Image: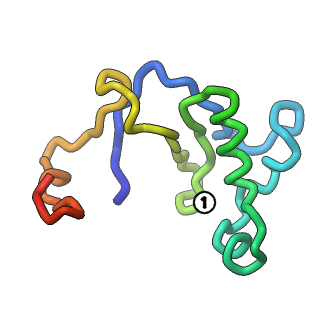
Amino acid sequence: MICTYFVRGLRMADFSAGFDPRQWPPLWADFAVDWRTEWFGKHNEPPTWYMADDVIAARLDGILFPSQAHSGGTNLVIYQSSTLPPDRLRVHDPEGVLQTIAHPSGRPG
């Protein structure tokens, strides 16, 4: 499920403009490679997994990157989001849709 979040005070690697060799490691140039093909087809660790390792090692909260599904869009990945306090990361769900989705335990959210 894709959700909208309100975020505040998070430290991000802003890769939203794409690869810039002056700012990012060379491996980051391959961010658009299909991770499924790399992992399942070639048995290689995808570049995006190395990117995640770099971001976490730099003690950043996440990464902004260009959407491959929607031209001109931007995606946000937040690592270890469940450890963030609600004042820094809050889901936007004005209609309460998420509360109607059952947890794996079978109990409603």
> Residue 32: x and y, percent?
71, 59
Residue reaching furthest front? Answer: 105
> Residue 8: x and y, percent?
41, 22
> Residue 50: x and y, percent?
73, 49
Q: Quadrant of the N terminus?
A: bottom left
Residue reaching furthest bottom? Answer: 41
Q: Secondary structure beneath disc 1?
A: loop
Q: Eyeballing the image, is 5 above or below 58?
A: below
Which residue is drawn at the image coordinates 81% and 37% (left, top)? 24
> Total number of numbered labels?
1
Colour basis? rainbow
Left/right of residue 72 with respect to residue 107 in the rendered view: right
Q: Eyeballing the image, is 53 above or below 49?
A: above
Which residue is drawn at the image coordinates 18% and 62% (left, top)? 105
Query: Quarter of the image holding residue 60?
Result: top right
Q: Eyeballing the image, is 11 above or below 96?
A: above
> Residue 31: x and y, percent?
73, 54
Which residue is drawn at the image coordinates 75% and 74% (left, top)? 43
Q: Which residue is mark 1?
A: 68
Q: Amino acid at mark 1?
A: Gln
Graded by Cα atoms within 10 Å as few (under 14), some (14 to 19) or many (20 or more), the crowding at tag 1 reads: few
Instruction: Give whichever of 104, 70 is nearer the camera.
Output: 104
Which residue is drawn at the image coordinates 39% and 29% (left, top)? 84
